[in-house]
Amino acid sequence: MRGLRACLGAAAAVGLVAAGAGAFAAGSASGAATALDNRWYAAAPYLMPTDNEPPDAGAIMDATGLKAFQLAFVLAPNGGGCSPTWGGTAPVSSDTAVRSVIDAIRAKGGDVSVSIGGYGGTKLGQSCADPAATAAAYQQVITKYGLHAIDFDLEEPEYENTAAVHNEIGAAKILQQNNPGLYVSVTTAGTADGTGWFGKQMLLEAKSQGFTPNNFSIMPFDGGFNGAASQTSALTNFNSILQSTFGWDQATAYAHEGFSGMNGRSDTGEYFSQADFQTVLDYATGHHMDRFTFWSLNRDRQCSPADNGGRTSGTCSSVAQNSWDFAKFSVRFAGATPPATGPTTPPPTQPGGACKGAWNSSTAYTGGTEVSYGHHNWKAKWWTQNEVPGASEWGPWQDEGAC
């Protein structure tokens, strides 16, 4: 999820995949987990169980009523190979740390989905020989943890690799066929138009392979977004892309569409408040969308100081909030009512002076011009047009602080 998220031969792979289908059922029967309603897997927020100061999942469950977590991320080994690891370093085959997190969640009546891919590291689709070998690697994860849900997080640089996307989509189709009832989501980058060229190519790959997951979700942040209105506009545009790609009507497209947001301050200095989440939640439920999630629970707590010095953090949201405020939106999407708590902390008052005129992507700015974007003022270092303030440390905009 952007900057903050971090082989077997074909014949052998097919055999492992086939064997894995029975192992999936056996794992469930042995007490690994009783499947939750699909709405819970659709609402599961992302949690890094071993990085970014992982919070206590049980405490979040008690405080919010949340039942499902999206654990991130399974990758190929950093040294190469076609076997699943957590974060590229910890083999799934010998894992006990994540297993203990999963066991604790299940002991309280919850369950997990596992997310594969993300923004950093080498993905299994890049390192495995073909879809069957890729599926066999993921089947090891499903079997070990008795999973009922899995998420394919396909973004850069992997989704720019045609062979890797072919392997990932092919693997997803194999897993869906060999693990009846498995909830499968596919998450990719969002743009103002819905998704970009690579996202559209990924959808075409799914169409060519005859694969339909429970949903295709976009991440409408880190792309010049400014609050909920820009996100719901992107979701509307993405719905049109799904219609035209798969020949679906609008309602069918929404039933296969998902939202994956970022709570608080994004990597590029966008701010998404609790009010923004409420607006998008209303849109998602009003259009009967299939998924509503966010990155991440590790960030679902207030920084100290509240604006975190104007920097994006992997361990807090950089907006004023009570702990787990954003998780409660997932609970509502799942159809449950969060436990009553005290009043929510009001949206933050940004320190600093008055905001300058808002940045506009179509306006050409000369050096020295000041604008506001993402609750910060920015000064142009040189002539620029359609370059988002804060998108790059070496870009044309100098951050003058919060406003």
Image: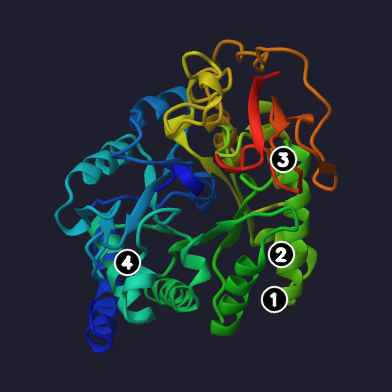
Mark toward the start of the polypeptide (1 vs 2): 1
Q: Horizontal and vertical percent for residue 176? A: 44, 71
* Whole-number angstrom distance, CA of label 4 to CA of label 1: 26 Å
User: Counting residues from the N terminus, which is met first, the one under dot 4 or under dot 1?
Assistant: 4
- Chain-order first, disc 4 or disc 3: 4
Q: Nearer the viewer, mark 3 or mark 2?
A: 3
Which amino acid type corresponds to the residue marked 3 in the rendered image? Trp
Identify the residue position indicated by label 1 in the image.
246
- Nearer the observer: mark 4 or 3; the answer is 3
Q: Nearer the viewer, mark 4 or mark 2?
A: 4
Q: Position of residue 272 (x, y in %)?
A: 65, 32
Question: Element under label 2?
Answer: helix
What residue is shown with label 2? 253
As displayed, is residue 15 above or below residue 327?
below
Circle on res. 382? 3
Examine the rendered structure and indicate whether residue 200 appears above or below residue 108.
below
Q: Which residue is mark 4?
A: 138
User: What is the spatial separation of the Cα atoms under label 3 and label 2, in whole angstroms?
Assistant: 43 Å
Task: Give the camera-side residue of 75 and 103.
Answer: 75
Of residue 63 and residue 325, the one placed in the foreground of this image is 325
Q: Looking at the image, do the residues carrying marks 4 and 1 touch, with CB atoms under 8 Å apart?
A: no
204 relative position to 382: left or right: left
Coordinates of residue 60 in the picture (x, y in percent):
41, 27
For this view, does 351 lie left or right of residue 48? right
Residue 13 at what x, y percent from top left? 26, 81
Looking at the rendered structure, the secondary structure element under dot 1 is: helix
**Which residue type carries mark 1?**
Phe
